[in-house]
Image: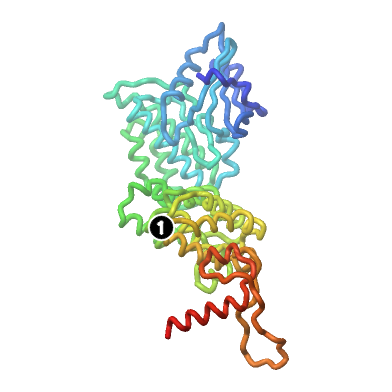
Amino acid sequence: MGGSSSSIKDYQLGQSYFTNADSNLKLTLSPATSILDKKKYTVFQFAKEKGKLNDEAERYVEVLKTTRHPYILRYLTSFTSSQQESVVTEHVIPLDVAVEKQAKEEIYAGLRNILEAILFLHEKSFICHNDISVSSVYVSDDGEWKLAAFENCSKVLRLSKKSFDNDITGFKEFALSVLEYLKDDIETTIAFMKRLGDELSEENKNEPCTLRSILEDPFFKFPYLQALDGIQKLPLKSTEDKNELFRDLHDVLQNMSPLVVCHRFIPILFSHMVITDTIANELFMSHLFASGNDYCVDAKLQPVLDKEHFMKYSLPKILSLYKLRDVTVRLTVMKYLPLYVDCIEKEILQEEVLPELLVGLKDTNDKVVQETFLALASIVAILGGNVVVGGESTTYFFDRTPDFSRFDDSVKDCDVVATKVSDVLKTTKPKKKEVDELMEERKRKRL
């Protein structure tokens, strides 16, 4: 039930994806934008009969409300009236609408998502879905497939394994239809499709088969899934597993299309979990932050993405990291600043990045201060010393290479002698006399 201070009127509904007016469910599915936070959501509106939901709608809403799993549609809130029940979920779109824009790797991963969701329903909730099909699946903004459509589900006895047969058959038929649509000619895909077809044939229909055995098929062991799974489960990985993951990750990503890397990997690779991982920093992070600039070329460093995709997808993530007050995150973005600094617009560098860096000069952590100075050095060539240091500057050092055409290079009068960085930041011009006196005093001390 939604909070007393909010209602479905707080959501602006878009054009509906579909309305099942003739079915028992009587469901209307629509995209929505919150008037309060401007975020996108999806609204499922179940029509009531005589002020009550029918049994199918009751089951659907109940499972959504009580089941939590990464690959089951995430329920957020709901609002009720005498005419309908409005359920607000994370923003998703129907699979049959989204699948055309997905790469084959995302489709493979989607099949595994649904398989894991069904296994969760069976093993933890003792629920049989009973209607696994394209219409039961939705796709989230980050490309993940989510299972829904629980109107035909049923509770089963813990010892009654036969009660899950509908889902086993349903998943095989669903996976086969998706792969036939994909028309992939990779050997493991062909072999998996043949397995599904054989197991669905009349002569093998009664042969025992479990969804766990399907999950162990070589089809679900391809590099994309293993890499994505490894990153998502990083906290559970051993040091040896992490070393293997990040040692090979650059090569694995290079064999994928840039859009798949951008949509599925970039968001999680720039997450706090990965950025702060010691092994990731040691073996992989330089590739992630590399833009392909001259510094990368000189260091013979291969970037994960070409410059166009780096600018569009990686750079916004990097810039957002400067706002975090986390020591490891700040040290990481500063360490790799030379790899991408020339990709940042001059205005953003001056108005957003520089102020954040200057905060680091005042920190009690000496390592942060040290690395901040190194980072500031990287942006002097772009913004100029006056902008980076602040205040007015004057010439103290000269090119002493013999050149008799050179004008007089005597030191100019200044106002204040700078003896530490804070003096430089608030000074204008030190006087020549004071500079000379300070230098003489230091000379006497050395003698």
Image quarter where the C terminus lies is bottom left
What's the residue at 60%, 36% (across, down)?
A: 97
Q: Position of residue 367 (x, y in %)?
A: 42, 61
Q: Which of the pair 426/90 is nearer the observer?
A: 426
Q: Quadrant of residue 311?
A: bottom right
Q: Position of residue 135 (x, y in %)?
A: 53, 30
On screen, residue 182 versus residue 283, left or right, reads right
On screen, residue 288 versus residue 45, left or right, reads left
- The answer to whether residue 254 shows anywhere in this view is no
Q: Residue pushed farthest left?
A: 159
Q: Secondary structure at mark 1?
A: helix
**Residue type marked 1:** Ala
229 is higher (above) or lower (below) than 22? below
Q: Position of residue 198 (x, y in %)?
A: 40, 39
Mark 1, other Cα within 10 Å: few <14 / some 14–19 / many ≥20: many
Name the residue that disc number 1 marks: 280
What's the residue at 62%, 85% (across, down)?
A: 399
